[in-house]
Image (cartoon, rainbow, N blue to C red):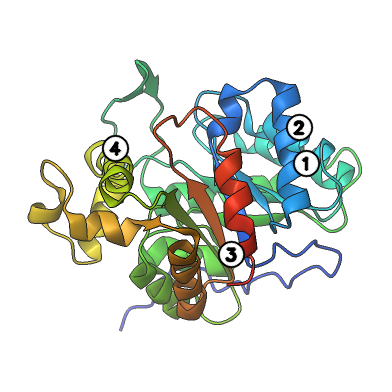
Amino acid sequence: MTPNTNRTTRPAPPPAPADEPLGRVGIWTLAFDGQPAGRVREAAAEIEELGYGAIWHGEALGRDTAGQAWLLLSATRRIPVASGIANIAFRDPIAMTTATRTLGEAFPGRYVLGLGGHRVDDTVHLVDGYPMPARGRAVTTMRGYLDAMDAVPAHGPRPDPAPRRLLAALGPKMLELAAHRTRGAHPYFVPVRHTAEARRIMGPDAFLGVEQAVVLDTDPDRARTVATEHVAMYVHGAPHQEANVRRLGFGDEDITGTPSRRLVDAIVAHGDADRIRERVAEHLAAGADHVCLQVLTASPSRLPLTAWRELAPAVLTA
């Protein structure tokens, strides 16, 4: 058998003892982008006070990921802040590396760099009319990006411990790369079945922090409407997410037109706090180390503070 010369055999870095633990349950949100800085600071401090283990922030065309992280870290005392994800198409490896080192030095052990955002073709994808840059084949591009980050010389202090890195991994090859080259993976828009598969592929030692979308609403029709809109946005607008759910056994009948109830319910947990706690427990039992909750509402630009408060007593005991 011809050996696979593209696959790295480098072991996963050992955890640094000074790193703040992420806990079992955190909060994931893109809603910070729509808020003034003072409101973001207040919300971050409350998330920490509620007892969540980590704050995860997405990146689209709002605040730069490093600036958002600095805002959140400076407003809190101990809680880790994780990019979910920092888009590699937005900045070169030098900019990503130097920003990460700065955050790691200023807030030792608290910053987690989640990397992703690769594109696999040259098709023009638009976000609010803005063309998003292509970066080539996903795994090859990410491996090269990590190599380039590792090669950036330090003309200043190196943070100790070095900030943890994760990959936005979905497919088997990216999950393997995450396990071999970083602390682990941050899968987004995945059912529990994917968590079990990711753990099998990555082995027992790699970190697995899974995003879970939720709708805290006991009206099933209203909750499923919000959940369906979320799922449709990804399966109709993000080819890598469509490919992933197909890989997990969903077909045309689940994806074409309005997403099927089977797909929506697999991706989004909805109902009361106890139902959402059950979904968190399912991910943890399937092999997740951490589950970060993205609360969906009918007003996605608003901070879902009421839901974060209501969920905390239930999910933090999952």
Mark nearest the camera among 4 and 3 is 3
Q: In this view of the protein, can residue 6 be seen by the observer?
A: no
Earlier along the polypeptide chain: callout 3 or callout 2? 2
The residue that label 4 is drawn on is 233
Amino acid type of the residue tagged 1 in the rendering = Ala
Q: Nearer the viewer, residue 242 or 137?
A: 242
**Which corner quadrant of the image does residue 95 belong to?**
top right
How far apart marks 4 and 3 lie (CA) works out to 29 Å
Q: Considering the numbered disc 3 on the image, is that residue within a helix, a strand or a loop?
A: helix
Residue sitting at 49 percent across and 80 percent down? Answer: 285
Circle 3 sits on which residue?
314
Number of numbered markers: 4
- Relative vertical location of residue 96 with respect to residue 127 in this rendering, above or below: below
Label 3 – label 1 distance at C-alpha: 20 Å
Gap in angstroms between the C-alphas marked 4 and 1: 31 Å
The answer to whether marks 4 and 3 mark residues whose Cβ atoms lie closer than 8 Å is no
